[in-house]
Image (tube, rainbow, N blue to C red):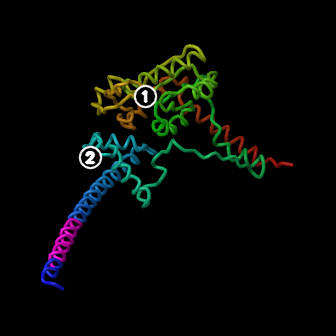
């Protein structure tokens, strides 16, 4: 090998070594950045887990379970734990949802503490006898305290309907979420129950779209069933001001410019406050105290159980 060839080979080897060391430094920097990000994410998740655990314990003590992720998000926003604004490509509530999922997956909180209104199970299985079936459903048979005119509670969101179902079952009323703008559902499901209600109690967001959704819902139903007593229980301008509720930015695709506007979601008002508002209004509307109805109901259920216990099917 000539002298020049040897020098050229040494230069080539030196260049390769420098490139390898530069690549190794770059990899090391990237690894440190990834590790730092993981530590940050881990720290955020730990803090959110702690905050969620404390918040859900408060919900349990107050009898406000199940609840929804959206209610928890706004409660944490109002406590200054998280921001209502999105960062990067993640939604504003994404870190909280990740922390909430980890609490459920490791058994820290029960799965049924959080409602899921997006899925349902339909059970059409039967019983070994008609007597067994009747015995099983006796306690589920409720008396009507409304004289066949129970209020219809409509909510804009499914999550809100989910946390109100227990209360609505207790008061024997009808509840349905519109899940935004609706047409077919109102015609085929809600309007067909019109012989059971003449009053609507509505709960929806305080914004442009929320107002349009309520107006459309009322227009469709009153076109089908006639005039209805209509009350907006939440949200109202007075409630937004009284509770200093957080305002977020929303977009409306119906507008060519994106329809950017301020909005206040119903879930920004705490679950306990919403439940109280609905319960107080139902108490005001009841023809008689609910406790009196429940006493008659229990007595009739016990009588029917005694009859069924003595009944022997052929």
In the image, what residue occupies the spot 43% across and 28% down?
Answer: 204
Q: Which residue is mark 2?
A: 81
As drawn, the residue found furthest toward the front would be: 2
In the image, farthest residue toward the right: 314
Span colored in magenta: 10-28
Q: Nearer the viewer, residue 128 or 181?
A: 181
Which of the 4 image quadrants contains residue 252? top left
Q: Could you tell me residue 75's position as x and y percent?
A: 32, 41
The residue wearing badge 1 is 204
| Foreground of the two, 179 or 133 | 179
Q: Is residue 205 above or below residue 71?
A: above
Residue at left offset 43%, top offset 22%: 212
Depicted 231 relative to depicted 141: above or below = above
The stretch drawn in magenta includes residue 17: yes
Specify the quadrant of the image occupied by residue 26: bottom left
Q: Tell me if 138 is positioned left or right of 15 in this view.
A: right
Q: Spatial distance from mark 1 to mark 2, Cα to Cα?
A: 25 Å
In the picture provided, is 185 more to the left or to the right than 230? right
* Residue 226 percent location from the top left of the image: 58, 14
Q: Main secondary structure of the magenta part?
A: helix
Element marked by disc 2:
loop
């Amino acid at each position: 090998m000539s002298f020049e060839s040897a020098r050229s080979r040494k230069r080539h080897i030196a260049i390769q070594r420098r490139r390898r060391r530069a690549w190794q430094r770059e990899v090391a920097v990237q690894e440190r950045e990834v590790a730092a990000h993981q530590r940050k994410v881990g720290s955020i998740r730990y803090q959110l887990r702690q905050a969620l655990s404390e918040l859900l314990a408060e919900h349990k003590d107050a009898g406000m379970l199940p609840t929804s992720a959206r209610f928890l998000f706004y409660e944490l926003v109002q406590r200054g734990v998280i921001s209502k604004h999105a960062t990067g490509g993640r939604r504003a509530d994404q870190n909280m949802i990740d922390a909430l999922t980890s609490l459920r997956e490791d058994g820290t909180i029960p799965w049924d503490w959080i409602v899921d209104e997006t899925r349902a199970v339909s059970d059409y299985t039967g019983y070994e006898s008609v007597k067994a079936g009747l015995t099983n459903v006796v306690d589920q048979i409720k008396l009507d305290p409304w004289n066949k005119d129970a209020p219809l509670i409509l909510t804009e969101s499914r999550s809100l309907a989910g946390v109100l179902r227990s209360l609505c079952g207790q008061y024997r009323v009808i509840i349905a979420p519109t899940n935004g703008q609706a047409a077919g559902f109102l015609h085929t499901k809600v309007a067909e129950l019109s012989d059971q209600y003449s009053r609507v109690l509505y709960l929806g967001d305080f914004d442009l779209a929320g107002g349009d959704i309520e107006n459309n819902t009322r227009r469709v139903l009153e076109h089908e069933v006639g005039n209805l007593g209509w009350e907006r229980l939440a949200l109202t301008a007075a409630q937004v001001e009284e509770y200093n509720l957080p305002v977020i930015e929303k977009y409306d695709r119906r507008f060519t410019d994106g329809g950017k506007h301020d909005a206040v979601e119903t879930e920004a008002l705490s679950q306990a406050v919403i439940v109280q508002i609905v319960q107080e209004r139902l108490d005001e509307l009841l023809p008689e105290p609910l406790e009196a109805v429940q006493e008659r109901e229990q007595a009739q259920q016990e009588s029917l159980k005694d009859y069924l216990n003595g009944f022997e099917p052929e």
